[in-house]
Amino acid sequence: MDRLKDGVPTSDVVVPPEVVVPPENGSAEPGESPPWEEEELGQNAYQRRLAEILDFPESKITVVNINLTEAIATGFGVWPKVQALRQALTKSVLDCRFHWVDGLEDYILALNFARAEYLVVTPPKRCAPEIWLEARQVRRVLVHDWRALAARGLLHPSQLRGLQRGKGYLELGTDLTVLSHVHRAYAASSGTALPPEVERASVLARAVLAAGGRPDPKSDAVVRAHDMQSRTFFLFVRAYNETRAAIAYMRRDEGDVDSIIPSLYAGKRRSRNSIPQRRSAL
């Protein structure tokens, strides 16, 4: 769990708003927005809410304990349902901040844009493809050698419990480090020569682990993008929870609020730092 002012959260995929595919002749159909306007909706929403984003109290920015991509996707999914119930909400609910409800789409789009801005300045590093392929091959060879030694009772299976065997940079780099250590320890105790892959594993592990790093989380660009993403996220959550509370009250007899606008925290334990859903006094 990453704090919004410090550290760098795991990157994920930004959920894009629906983009209108331009006709073959390059012009929009009569009555439709030009495709470039659709593509800029996120940025336009972000600019419309910029003053509100900047004015959001820093003291209220705490911890994000949900996946931002899932939150954005959920927001896009529920917005048409909210629009369909908007007129009924006005008649049924009196105590509601309708300016937040009506702004929910803007907050979703603005968060999607802020998330994209953050991901642009925090791209993961990549190592050369040939290094990656060689590292995977060396891992396979050393694992095979270890299993052969273990089958002869020369190595104990517990020595490789630390293997990750994952597909990421950190997992591969860690595996090469562990395998190199085990084979070096065996060679030292048995007096046998080191296989050439062991020496290469140490070099490859360093290259792969370095490629798994991220930009400096304290750089000005990362700090600013992270801060703006955080502020936009909490504005989105505030509007989302207000909308959910109003619909929950209106649909209290049906009890189907979760099918219309599910909690952003569904399936998760609420932490003390999460934004509490306001209980509507309606």
Image: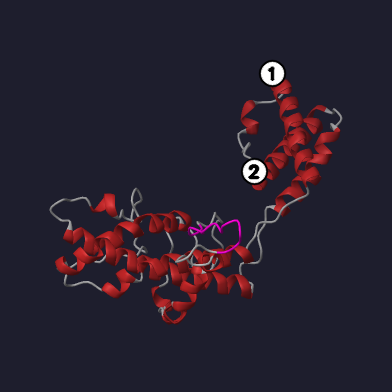
**Looking at the image, which residue is at 37% across and 64% down?**
273
Report the amino acid beneath label 2.
Glu
63 sits to left or right of 196: left
For residue 77, say whether it is visible.
Answer: yes
Q: Position of residue 159 (x, y in %)?
A: 65, 32
Q: Which residue is mark 2?
A: 171
Q: Given the current orientation, which residue lies at the most extreme left position?
A: 253
Camera-side residue: 136 or 146?
Answer: 136
Q: Residue at x 77, y 45 (%)?
A: 129
Query: What range of the chain is rendered magenta?
Result: 16-27
Position of 259 with respect to 212 (left or right) is: left
Distance in Å between CA atoms under marks 1 and 2: 25 Å
Q: Quadrant of residue 205?
A: top right
Task: Please tell me whether residue 147 is drawn above or below residue 116 in the rendered image.
Answer: above
Question: Badge 2: how crowded within 10 Å, few (<14), some, or many (20+)?
Answer: some
| Camera-side residue of 227 and 186 | 227
Q: Which residue is tagged 1?
A: 151
Going 75% across and 38% down the picture, which residue do you hit? Answer: 180
What secondary structure is marked by label 2? Answer: helix
What kind of residue is marked 1?
Ala
